[in-house]
């Protein structure tokens, strides 16, 4: 009970203490004052005859500790079982009322002293209540959260080498400095707090730049590269899928538009530059992690362990790019022309390491995502000249990473290796029979300034190691990237970078000649 409430109850208590027939002169004030002047106890333990098992123990303890208005007998007893005289009751109540008066006076003094601060605080509370009311009235949804990401990129490629005609053609088609963008808006909806319905809108204008691809001179695209099939600056529904848990370790995903690399049990590598798609998007194994996008169904299992302990994880998914086409000769689900991929991943991870293996079976139309001009052209996987199916590809990848427990001069290390084999359906003499790729990435955290990162990666994008012809193509190439990321604020970053490819055409490089490319970019990222 609050002090003010006890104050209001005091008159009633006084009435109970005095019999209806009592006269005012019956109250011996000297006796009352004598009792009240006795030294008050400060702890209930001072009473030798009061035990915690007594029914009024807590009430008596509160009176002593909060108000200090209870006195005992000189011999250290309380004699709680003895009836109180009217004098004793009046003295006890008077002492408690005096303490309440002291508390009330102190509260009034504090209120007066902090009057200005209380007025400011009251105004702020009123302002917050008004803002909350406004937000509740104008909020988009009670179940949906909007987040976004916008990326600007300014850059150009320089083409060099002794293959004069090819070099000049590359400069003519892709030698200009470009300014491109990518914007993504995620609408994340949850109905239970554990599920997720994701709808993503996306627009960009990369298709005509040197940083899209893959084509002959643009064998490596950037991770942020995007443009709608309808043209530049057109908004697409880029993702639409629903994820829900079943128990503590299993999660299912069903979607009209989802991507196989987003349905994995764990990330194969921790290297993340957000620059070349080969390193960041397909983890150095473009044949396996080919970022197939379409109608999808998938399942992810993660072993439930104590936080920080190693765990096992597995995932399977099926993605059909042509699922919306009702003509079985051109698409559908589960047909030879679905342009579908089936992927399985198994791995384990600890606090600062991870190891995984993955397999992907791909139908006609499921490309390698990146590679030399020679290899990528051959990666339509058994499609005939009209695009009809019948062929397939088998892809396998092994990946691992390690990262230090603390930031410093020791970088995280990521590595991947992948191999793809193609069936001989509709084969031609120059078609790829097998292709391989690999990458090693190093990344440093908190370089020079806390929050700033730096990294470099080297590897070989998918290159043909054997063909259906009797000769082995000379398709090897090397890819490098170097970058430093300035974290300007929590939501804004600026990343200058250099990217290099030794033989973008691979086997198609003119005999005895060389052709390479060096790109310089500045990428600015905004998150909101």
Image (spheres, grey):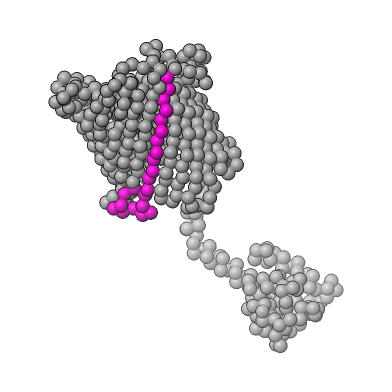
Q: Residue furthest front?
A: 470
Q: Is residue 471 visible?
A: yes
Q: Nearer the viewer, residue 425 or 480?
A: 425
Question: Which residue occupies 26% across, 34% down?
Answer: 479
Q: Is residue 197 visible?
A: no
**At 48% across and 28% down in the image, what residue appears?**
342
Depicted 118 relative to depicted 504: above or below: below
Q: Position of residue 71 (x, y in %)?
A: 69, 80
Residue 398, above or below 52: above
Residue 277 in the image: x percent, y percent? 34, 33
Let me know if residue 180 is in the magenta part: no
* The C terminus lies in quadrant: top left
* Image point (37%, 34%), residue name: 418
Image: magenta residue range = 391-412
Task: Between residue 248 and residue 494, name the one nearer to us.
Answer: 248
Q: Quadrant of residue 379?
A: top left
Instruction: Give the residue at x 56% y 68%.
Output: 106
Counting the numbered discs, the total is 0
Residue 401 located within the stretch drawn in magenta:
yes
Residue 283 point in image, percent of width and height: 37, 36
């Amino acid at each position: 009970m609050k002090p003010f409430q006890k104050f209001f109850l005091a008159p009633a208590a006084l009435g109970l203490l005095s019999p209806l027939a009592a006269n005012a002169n019956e109250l011996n004030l000297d006796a009352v004052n004598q009792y009240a002047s006795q030294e008050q106890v400060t702890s209930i333990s001072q009473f030798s005859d009061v035990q915690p098992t007594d029914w009024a123990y807590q009430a008596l303890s509160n009176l002593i500790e909060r108000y200090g208005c209870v006195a005992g007998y000189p011999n250290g007893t309380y004699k709680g079982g003895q009836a109180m005289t009217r004098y004793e009751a009046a003295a006890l109540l008077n002492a408690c009322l005096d303490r309440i008066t002291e508390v009330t006076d102190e509260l009034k003094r504090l209120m007066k002293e902090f009057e200005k601060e209380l007025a400011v605080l009251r105004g702020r509370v009123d302002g917050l209540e008004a803002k909350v009311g406004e937000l509740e009235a104008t909020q988009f949804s009670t179940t949906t959260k909007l987040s976004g990401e916008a990326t600007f990129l300014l850059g150009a490629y320089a083409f060099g080498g002794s293959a004069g005609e090819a070099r000049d053609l590359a400069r003519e088609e892709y030698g200009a400095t470009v300014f491109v963008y990518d914007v993504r808006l995620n609408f994340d909806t949850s109905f239970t707090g554990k599920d997720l319905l994701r709808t993503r809108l996306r627009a960009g204008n990369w298709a005509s730049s040197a940083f899209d691809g893959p084509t002959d001179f643009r064998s490596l695209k950037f991770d942020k590269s995007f443009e709608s099939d309808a043209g530049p600056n057109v908004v697409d529904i880029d993702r639409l899928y629903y994820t829900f848990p079943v128990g503590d370790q299993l999660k299912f995903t069903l979607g009209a538009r989802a991507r196989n690399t987003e349905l994995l049990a764990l990330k194969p590598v921790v290297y993340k530059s957000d620059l070349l798609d080969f390193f960041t998007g397909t983890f150095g194994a473009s044949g396996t992690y080919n970022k197939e996008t379409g109608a999808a169904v998938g399942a992810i299992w993660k072993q439930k362990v104590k936080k920080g302990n190693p765990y096992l994880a597995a995932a399977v998914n099926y993605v059909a790019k042509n699922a919306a086409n009702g003509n079985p000769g051109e698409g559908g689900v589960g047909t030879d022309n679905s342009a579908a991929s089936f992927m399985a991943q198994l791995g384990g991870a600890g606090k600062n390491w991870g190891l995984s293996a993955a397999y992907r079976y791909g139908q006609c139309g499921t490309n390698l995502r990146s590679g030399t001009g020679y290899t990528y052209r051959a990666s339509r996987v058994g499609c005939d000249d009209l695009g009809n199916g019948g062929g397939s590809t088998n892809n396998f990848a092994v990946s691992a990473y390690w990262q230090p427990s603390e930031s410093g001069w020791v970088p995280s290390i990521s590595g991947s290796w992948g191999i793809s084999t193609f069936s001989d359906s509709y084969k031609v003499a120059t078609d790829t029979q097998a292709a391989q790729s690999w990458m090693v990435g190093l990344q440093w955290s908190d370089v020079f300034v806390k929050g700033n990162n730096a990294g470099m990666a080297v590897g070989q994008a998918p290159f043909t190691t054997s063909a259906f012809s009797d000769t082995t193509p000379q398709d090897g190439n090397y890819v490098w990237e170097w970058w430093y990321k300035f974290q300007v604020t929590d939501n804004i970053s600026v990343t200058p970078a250099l990217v290099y490819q030794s033989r973008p055409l691979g086997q198609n490089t003119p005999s005895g000649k060389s052709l390479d490319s060096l790109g310089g970019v500045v990428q600015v990222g905004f998150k909101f």
